[in-house]
Image (cartoon, coloured by chain):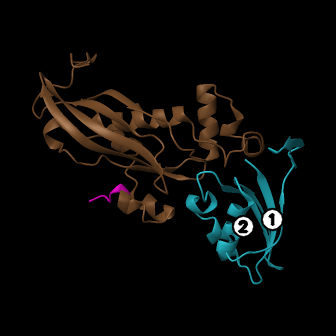
Chain colours: A cyan, B brown
Amino acid sequence: MPRFIAVAEKPGLSEAEFRNAVDRTGKWRFAKRGWIVKAYCALDKGKLVVECEAPQQSDFEDWLEKNGWLTEDIHRVSYIHEGGLVWPMPS
Amino acid sequence: MAPTVEELLKLEPNQMFEYDESPDIEEVKNRQQVYFEDVEIGEELPKYIHTYTIVELVRWCIAMENTHRLHYDYAFSHNQDNLPGTLFHGTFRMSIIGKWLKNWVMPNGWMWKASWQVREMVTATETTILWGKVTGKRKIEGYGLVDIELGIVNEEGWEGAPGKATVALPFRGGEPVPYPFVPPAEG
């Protein structure tokens, strides 16, 4: 399944709002085949970086929109570095 | 009266824990026998509500000598196997179902047989509810048999271990279920 990464913005984003977006399974695993892998937030600037696996980019976009997070940029990921290893993502 | 699974699923996970019926060690040691006559069709068994942490998954990996990384290595699970997280083992589910049935029938009953399927990915951090409902009961010579429908749902109600079991319970005023247990002819 493809991996996507998005940069998003939500001015005034709070910790509570960020937590609320992923505070139970049905929120972060939003579909049988679709889940948020990681999400990062910088509260002071209202910026987010979010990773997602989903069959279609539009699934991820819908999730971001549902949270009121404005997508600035979104990409399909080719490779990931984590823990000293490089992992290819499905093409 | 304990809430039903359906009622629990309307709660937030941290609220669900208030209704966890897992016994502590003293309750297990001092367990009062459930007798065949006490059980009614449709009755729910005590629900065990728990969030399995990655520490518990690692401990199970060690116990089972199952070192597959999808159970404890987030990077591998996410990036190699493209999974939502580290997965709750099928064998771990098997273990807790056995313990739960044993706890319910002890000290003088017997967990005769159980079967279930492993479905749905359940990851560390998800809250799970181990549930069961009595679907049938019948007397045979010396003790009674109770049929149970069971499963382990996560906090969203996704069923991860649909199955069934049959346990043997003593009659009130009767003898303990014989040990070693010899299954009745019905198979």
Q: Is B88 rendered above or below residue A60?
A: above
Q: What residue type is labelled 1?
A: Ala
* Residue range highlighted in magenta: B1-5
Please report contact status of discs 1 and 2: CB closer than 8 Å, yes or no. yes
Q: Is A14 rendered above or below residue B63?
A: below
Residue at 56%, 60% (x, y): give it: A26
Q: Which amino acid does label 2 sit on?
A: Glu
What's the mark number on residue A6? Answer: 1
Please state which of the two labelled residues, at mark 1 or mark 2, is closer to the viewer: 2
Q: Is mark 2 on a helix, strand or loop?
A: helix
- State the residue in front, A30 or B7: A30
Image label count: 2
Q: Where is residue B64 in the image (x, y as percent from the top left)?
A: 59, 27
Within the image, what quadrant is residue B87 found in? Answer: top right
Chain hosting mark 1:
A
State the CA–CA distance, disc 1 to disc 2. 9 Å
Chain hosting mark 2:
A
Q: In this view, does A71 lie to the left or right of A15?
A: right
Within the image, what quadrant is residue B111 found in? Answer: top left
Residue at 77%, 40% (x, y): give it: B80
What's the mark number on residue A32? Answer: none
Q: What element carries label 1?
A: strand
Q: Is residue B130 left or right of residue B87?
A: left
Residue at 45%, 54% (x, y): give it: B157
Q: Is residue B34 visible?
A: no
Residue topped by disc 2 = A61
